[in-house]
Each structure stands twice: as C-alpha cells, then as structure tokens.
Amino acid sequence: MTAGLSRRAAICGIGQTEFSKESGRTELQLACECVKSALDDAGLSPADVDGLVTFTMDTTEEIDVVRNLGIGELSMFSRVPYGGGAAAGTVLQAAMAVATGVADVVVCYRAFNERSGMRFGGFASTLTSMPLFLSWYGPYGLLTPASWVALHARRYMETYGVTNADFAPIAVVDRKHAATNPDAWFHGRPITVEDHQASRWIVEPVLRLLDCCQESDGGVAIVVTSTERARDLRQVPAVIEAAAQGATFDGESMTSYYRDDLTGLQEMGAVARRLWSMSGLSPDDIQTAFLYDHFTPFVLMQLEELGFCGRGEAKEFATVENLSIGGRLPINTNGGLLGEAYIHGMNGITEGVRQVRGTSHNQVDAVEHVLVTSGTGVPTSGLILGRD
C-alpha cells in the first residue's frame, strides 16, 4: 500500500437486505438483492459493473451474480480470506482495481444465512473439519470463537486489571444506538450496565451473553468507482482516504497464543500504522468509528492499537459518555454487530458511508473522517472514509 491510492476511489453506492434470523431465501438471492440495491443507490445499472469482490467464505459464486443480475463482462474478480477480517479488504481490492484502471465499477458483497443456516458461533463445523493447528486446542474444549477470544482476552484483563464490567459500556452503547436505528435487529431495545452484568456467562470470567455478537441472516453490498466518476453519480461520494490490510509474524486465525505478548492485537496495529500513514491523519481527526465488535474485549484492545488511548487505558476511555453520540468518539452508530446485525462487518462500512453522507439514523455532527475496522484475532483490514 502506498499513499498513491489515497482519495483515488470512492464508495458511490450501498445496499442491504433486511437483517433477520430467518431470511427464507437462498444466499444467492440475498447477494443479488443487496448488489441490485447498491447499484440502484448509486444510480448505476448491472451493465456498468466490471468487477466483483467478496469473501473466500461466501457461498455465492461471482458468475452466478453476473448471470442473475445481467452483468456483462468482468475484468476482475477477487476474494479475501479470514472471515470478518476481509470486510474492509474487499474495498481495498476494489479501490486498487479502480485506481490502476483494471476495472471501472467494482461491487463488494457478502451474503449469508448465518443464523438459519451454518452458525459460526457453534462448534459442529469445527469438529467436522478441524484444521491442524486447532488440534492443540480443540481436545481441551476451545472449539468456538467465544472460547478462542476469551483465552486471549484473559491475559489482557490480568495485565491491566480489567474486569468484565469494563466491557459493559461497549454493549450498552451499541444497543443504545441500535435502539434508534429502525434497520437494527435490536431496534427499540436498549440495555443498561445492570442488564449486561445480569446476563449469563458464556466463558467465565471474560464473556457474558451481552458481550457476544448476534447471528444474522442478510446481505450487504458496496459499489466502488473512481472519485471523479462518483462526483457525477446520485449520492455524495465517500472517498477512500486510506485502506489497508495487516498480517503479522507468528499468527494463527483466532488462536495466536504463542506470541510473546497477548495484550494487544498485532494485526490491527499493523493496519492502524498503514491507515494513519496513507491518510496523513491521526486519531484526533476522526469524528466517528465503526470498531468491529464481535466480542467486546477486542473493542477495548482496538482502541489502544489504533492510538485513541495508551496501553491499558481503554477501560477509562471507553465510557458510555465517550462512545455515544456527542462524546469523544461515537462508535458503531448503527448498533454494530451486537445491536444491528452480524454481516461479517460489511454493515460497518455502509454505516461509515452514511455518516459521510449525513444520512445515518444516528448522525454525528460535522463528520469529515470515519474509521472502519474489520474482524480481530485474524489477519484484518481497515478503512478511513471522508468527504470529497
């Protein structure tokens, strides 16, 4: 990644299906619906599309999207691995294609029945297809994302004197914002710190039920084109000021337990350095952020890796007041993965676009720059979006 990519591409369209627990439709249909919605939002047609990017985990083949929507020739198609870590990476791939002239209009999409179909939060799929590295952990009960994250977060808690109660503000803020977002699954259903502390343990003493994200059905799509072309389209462009991916030494997917230091998220630190360098911005320039919140402890650790506070200081920084609308850094204004839906982080990107456009249900005043992060505990990615 070089600074040469900064501001050369923009998000010009966003689309999504409803978010549910039982879509009643195939994942292909969800993908086609959200892609069509995003193109309509941009004022483009399927015939304008010449690139597609999705996750390696997505079940919908690009050629099926092409055939069902009437897209013509593709000049590029790409997939990004590592689950939720891929979200912003899809936009990075699209922006690179546009900036280098490989493609003109690239659509990024992710669609799944993650509640009514294969549930990522369970362990059945792990048991039937356990990768070799999990043979060190699986026999001892580490078979779910919650258990993998909890073991990592436990070292952070011990080192910095963090308790489960320090994670409560993340859940409370997410649900507060979801409560005023009609598109959120938990619309109209805020919670209190007391509610969080009364929820049952999932992995004691780290994760309670309200520390864990939802399982959702749905689809999200994002249209990327050149900043110049985006200016002539239907919506206010969300310019891609920076985009980065990050993977670091001695990592595994969710179980990087053999590193010297387990109190941080090295991959997010690598992404942060690239984002700040590419954009020329700093944490002080960010008005709002979507911080990937599959599990609340990793939100605190992200705040530190991204430079919003020092090591071990997130528990003081991450108050309900600081993270809510009107605070120092309003986060997850759509409700996040905890409150709106778990669409592998793609709905965080669409909310970032709405904040730049000024159309969010929970709009932050005078937004110039929005930070978006992707899945943590895995090789990951991030974006900074801004006004033209």
Image (tube, rainbow, N blue to C red):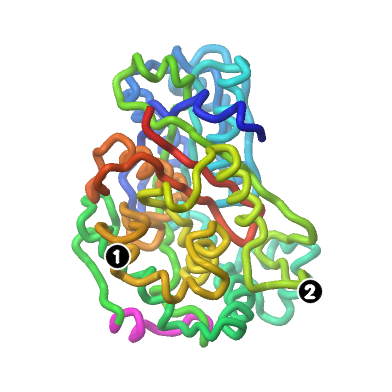
**Element at badge 1?**
helix
Direction from residue 285 to residue 156 in the image, left or right: right
The answer to whether residue 176 is above or below residue 286 is below
Rate crowding at label 2 as few (under 14), some (14 to 19) or many (20 or more) other CA atoms within 10 Å. few
Please report the bounds of the magenta region as a residue range. 194-204
The answer to whether residue 151 is above or below residue 82 is below
The answer to whether residue 117 is above or below residue 59 is below
Identify residue type, mark 2: Trp
Residue holding disc 2:
136
Inter-mark Cα distance, 2 to 1: 36 Å
Q: Which residue is nearer to you in this view: 26 or 10?
A: 10
The reply to whether residue 294 is in sight is no
Label drawn at residue 73: none
Q: Is residue 276 magenta?
A: no
Quarter holding the C terminus is top left
The reply to whether residue 374 is in sight is yes
Residue 177 in percent (x, y) is at 27, 59
Taking the spot 55% from the left edge, 28% from the top edge, the residue there is: 95
Direction from residue 179 to residue 167 in the image, left or right: right
The quadrant holding residue 141 is bottom right
Direction from residue 295 to residue 136 in the image, left or right: right
Taking the spot 35% from the left edge, 44% from the top edge, the residue there is: 351
Identify residue type, mark 1: Arg
Q: Are marks 2 and 1 in contact (CB under 8 Å)?
A: no
Rate crowding at label 1 as few (under 14), some (14 to 19) or many (20 or more) other CA atoms within 10 Å. many
Residue 287 in percent (x, y) is at 36, 49
Label drawn at residue 175: 1
Q: Which residue is nearer to you in this view: 364 or 171?
A: 364
